[in-house]
Amino acid sequence: MAAADRRLGAYWSMTRSQVYRELPALAELGYVKLGKPGPRASQPYAITAAGKRAFSRWLGEAPGRDLVRNPTALRVAFGAQHGAGQLKDLVARANEYHNEALVTAREQAKEAKKEGDDYGAAALDFAVSYHKAALAWLKTAPAK
């Protein structure tokens, strides 16, 4: 989970429960295999040859449409129903989150470029642009 979050977390959200739900299903399909239990009964998995082939097929598929699910924008849409100060606090918390996430994404993109990972850096550049756009939008969002 930590490795997935480091690699993908800046632009793809996932929960621990999603990951732990999918791993046994992938093992049943023969795409991953269970390794020896680690510290604190952790269950490491490794990708199999069949898993690598399935991953290659998946990469070749059309990605489908982007899903936009921004909880702050959703709550702003119901701004008239917010209590005094509630919307202002919402916007302040969102600003804090996006500023922190922007710093992290920039650092990760810089590190990826330094390591020669142009593809990872490109995906992280998306995360940088997303957080910049969110911060720009928050400046214009009504906060009562």
Image: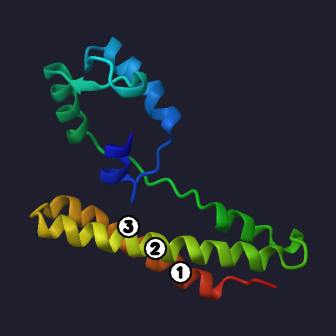
What amino acid does circle 2 point to? Answer: His
What amino acid does circle 1 point to? Answer: Leu
C-alpha gap between disc 2 and disc 1: 6 Å
What amino acid does circle 3 point to? Answer: Ala
Q: Secondary structure at mark 1?
A: helix
Picture layout, residue 11 above or below residue 125:
above
Residue 129 left/right relative to 61: right
Residue depicted at 29% across the width and 44% down the height: 62
Looking at the picture, how far across and down is residue 124, in whole percent? 30, 65
Tags 2 and 1 touching, CB below 8 Å: yes
Tags 2 and 3 touching, CB below 8 Å: yes
Residue 33 left/right relative to 90: left
Badge number at residue 135: 1
Return the residue nearer the eye: 96 or 133.
96
Q: Quadrant of residue 45?
A: top left
Looking at the picture, how far across and down is residue 91, in whole percent? 68, 77
Tags 1 and 3 touching, CB below 8 Å: no
Residue depicted at 30% across the width and 72% down the height: 107
| Label 1 crowd bin: few (<14), some (14–19), many (20+), radius 10 Å | many
Return the residue nearer the eye: 118 or 106.
106
Q: Quadrant of residue 86?
A: bottom right
Picture layout, residue 111 above or below residue 19:
below
Residue depicted at 82% across the width and 85% down the height: 144
Q: Secondary structure at mark 3?
A: helix
Residue matched to label 2: 131
Q: Quadrant of residue 47?
A: top left
C-alpha gap between disc 1 and disc 3: 12 Å
| Label 3 crowd bin: few (<14), some (14–19), many (20+), radius 10 Å | many
Looking at the picture, how far across and down is residue 79, in whole percent? 81, 73
